[in-house]
Amino acid sequence: MTDTGPLFVSSGDLIADRRYKWALDHAARGDFSGAAEILAQTVDLAPRFATAWFALGAIRDRLGDRDGAVAAFVHARDADPEDYHGARLQLARLGAGAATPAMTETYVRRLFDQYAGRYDAALTEHLNYRGPAILTSAVEAAMRAAYWSNSRRPMHFAAMLDLGCGTGLAGAAFRPFVDRLVGVDLSPAMIAKAEAKGLYDRLVSAGLADFLGEEAARDAKYDLVIAADVFVYINDLAQVIAACARILAPEGLLAFTVETHSDAGTKLLPTLRFAHGEATLRAAMTAAGLTPLTIEAAMVRTEKDEPVEGLVVVAACQA
């Protein structure tokens, strides 16, 4: 899921707000040069108007003015410490600033809150999203093989945690195999959609790092932790994988999908999602004390009708 347009946040100046909307009208008619000129006047009037700076950066970028776009996105970033609009990501995409900046919780929450109402249809009908099915098959295969155990185990889990559960697409796929299903997501709107489906025994709206830390502090244990199309929004997976390992029961499984690339390390894609190299994933799992059972190529979704290069991963916590 991508989002490169600004969501309006008032400048507090009615005249500046009106000029901003006037500029968007020009852009909607295809007059991007006129829109850029009006937005430049708008930020002169309201220098801390992050939404207008972000829109100016996006329009200058569309006009091929990279330096002008970078300058505008820098102003947007500086006027918006929580990076509500994602200016840091745009700067990274343009080769300015940090190459793989962390997405702020404010940005991710806003992104998914606004998509919650059409999320299921967008993924399943337009992006050919197959994450839950791919994860279910990978976990089932790992259970049949039971490489890490002396005997094969049935496809059954006493407790499962669905990281970034969204509206519950992955929860629905795994519910038949789980006694107790817990879901966590940063977006309250997504949690509300998941709650309406009646799949989960517990749902929490929280950031992943905070939630995993709290679960570890109370010594919670899960037999299966999954993350379907979630780690594409996290730049440093080592920390979250280590946090997952701390709440896995002995012989518990961590299963997730990622977008990937042929090089090492982490890369910010033009879609403003992160792709993770296989070597980086292996190192993170080893450091967390997990044993990789499955690391296989997988087409989790499409982007503009083209398959997105991905991996499905299953790792085990040693007894």
Image (cartoon, rainbow, N blue to C red):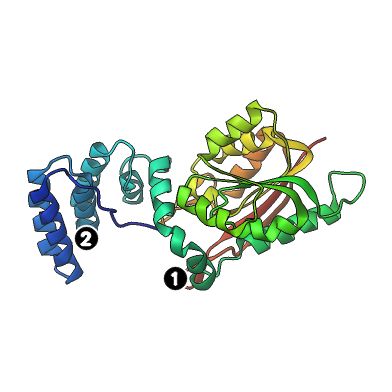
Q: Residue at x 52, y 65 (%)?
A: 120
Residue 85 horizontal side relative to residue 152, left or right:
left
- CA distance for labels 1 and 2: 22 Å
Name the one closer to the observer, 147 or 240: 240
Q: Which mark is residue 64?
A: 2
What residue is at 66 percent from the left and 47 percent from the top? 201
Q: Residue at x 92, y 44 (%)?
A: 150
Q: Which residue is more in the foreground, 186 or 240?
A: 186
Q: Quadrant of the N terminus?
A: bottom left
In the figure, residue 107 lies in which quadrant? top left
Q: Nearer the viewer, residue 294 or 30?
A: 30
- Is 279 on the left-hand or right-hand side of 20? right
Q: Which residue is mark 1?
A: 304
Q: x%, y% of residue 106?
A: 39, 42
Count of numbered circles on the image: 2
Tell me the kind of residue under disc 2: Gly
Left of 183 or right of it: where is 125?
A: left
